[in-house]
């Protein structure tokens, strides 16, 4: 954060009635730093902010709080206690930065439920309820990681599904001195569970999102799939990965090439026929990720002499 944002956050978290600010005249910079405060996980007690000017200078702001000081501090205490329990359950204290980011991504994706019916759906209090929307879930991830020594911001933007697309929020995480995107909400769906948006670069995010990022994300070196070598650049490399896959473990491979779903499933079928020991659960493609689950019986749908998707109806049938 900049000096203005730092000052506002300190005052809001401290429940000050008035917050002195470094004198500032640039409205664009001021608005951007104020947005950082709104995206901070711990400023959920803000109802609104009003500003005091002396001539051209903004010199202070007066927060209007949505809850009393005692209630806010008690709520913060319960949230910190919950974060502590989550950290102990995940074993975060013994992990590296990248391992912490992966673990928190998995926790938020699997344990917090999308729910847009709650009054606290947009803020950190949704961690107590276990339910919220994208910005609430992003603030939960940011708070958990920050409490365990990993710098994490909340970034807001839009999905590219329409013009203008719906608003969305996710995280920027600093791992190994570089920033990466982390989007727990869109790595999963009702039918799929992946790490597709776990520590990715701007190029990957720009395929489906627009945003104004405070920092560039140019690396994929700590990405979930690249770090493990679970990336296929074509059908031959996908086949090699499947043949070498550890026995009885869930398959999750990022396909970094243009593909036809039927050809991907055909590659899996051929690998199994040639002796690859792959799990027998349902198979599907979510975004650019091939997944073969360990659980649930195998159901292969045949299309003439070639294979198609298992269960979820991916590909033709």
Image (spheres, helix red, strand yellow):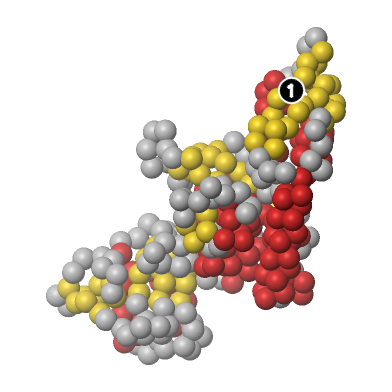
Left or right of 205 on screen, residue 40:
right
Q: Residue at x 59, y 72 (%)?
A: 228
Q: Nearer the viewer, residue 276 or 126?
A: 126
- Please, which residue is most extreme toward the top here? 55
Q: Position of residue 299 (x, y in %)?
A: 27, 81
Q: Residue at x 34, y 77 (%)?
A: 282
Q: Which of the image's four quarters has the C terminus?
A: bottom left
Q: Position of residue 256 (x, y in %)?
A: 46, 60
Number of residue marks: 1
Q: Which of the image's four quarters has the N terminus?
A: top right
Vertical comparison of 220 with 62: above or below: below
Which residue does the numbered mark 1 point to in the structure image?
Answer: 51
Left or right of 241 on screen, residue 162:
left
Vertical comparison of 155 with 269: above or below: above
Vertical comparison of 167 with 255: above or below: above
Residue 27 quadrant: top right
Helix or strand or loop: what does disc 1 sit on? strand
Q: Position of residue 88 (x, y in %)?
A: 72, 74
Left or right of 223 on screen, residue 37:
right
Q: Residue at x 46, y 62 (%)?
A: 188
Q: Is residue 149 visible?
A: yes
Q: Is residue 201 visible?
A: no
Q: Nearer the viewer, residue 246 or 116?
A: 116
Q: Position of residue 196 (x, y in %)?
A: 50, 61
Vertical comparison of 280 with 314: above or below: below
Q: Nearer the viewer, residue 187 or 124?
A: 124
Left or right of 206 on screen, residue 162:
left
**Structural crowding at the residue carrying mark 1, measured as other residues with C-alpha within 10 Å and reported as few (<14), some (14–19) or many (≥20):** some
């Amino acid at each position: 954060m900049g000096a203005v944002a730092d000052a506002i956050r300190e005052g809001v978290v401290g429940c000050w009635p008035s917050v002195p600010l470094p004198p500032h005249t640039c409205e664009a910079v001021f608005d951007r730093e104020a947005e950082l405060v709104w995206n901070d996980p711990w400023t959920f007690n803000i109802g609104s902010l009003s500003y005091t000017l002396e001539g051209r200078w903004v010199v202070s702001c007066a927060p209007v709080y949505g809850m009393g000081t005692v209630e806010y501090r008690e709520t913060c205490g319960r949230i910190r206690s919950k974060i502590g329990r989550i950290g102990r359950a995940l074993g975060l204290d013994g992990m590296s930065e990248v391992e912490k980011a992966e673990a928190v991504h998995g926790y938020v994706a699997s344990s917090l439920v999308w729910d847009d019916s709650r009054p606290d759906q947009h803020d950190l209090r949704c961690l107590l309820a276990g339910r919220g929307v994208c910005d609430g879930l992003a603030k939960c991830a940011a708070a958990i990681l920050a409490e365990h020594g990993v710098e994490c911001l909340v970034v807001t933007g839009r999905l590219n599904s329409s013009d203008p697309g719906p608003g969305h929020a996710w995280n920027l995480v600093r791992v190994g001195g570089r920033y990466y995107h982390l989007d727990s909400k869109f790595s999963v769906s009702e039918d799929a569970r992946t790490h597709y948006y776990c520590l990715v670069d701007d190029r990957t995010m720009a395929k489906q999102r627009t945003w104004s990022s405070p920092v560039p994300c140019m690396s994929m070196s700590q990405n979930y799939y690249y770090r493990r070598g679970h990336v296929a650049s074509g059908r031959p490399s996908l086949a090699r990965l499947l043949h070498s896959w550890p026995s009885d473990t869930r398959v999750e491979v990022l396909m970094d090439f243009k593909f036809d779903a039927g050809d991907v499933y055909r590659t899996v079928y051929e690998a199994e026929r040639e002796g690859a020991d792959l799990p027998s659960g349902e198979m599907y493609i979510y975004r650019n990720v091939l997944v073969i689950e360990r659980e649930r019986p195998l159901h292969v749908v045949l299309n003439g002499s070639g294979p198609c998707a298992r269960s979820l109806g991916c590909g033709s049938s």
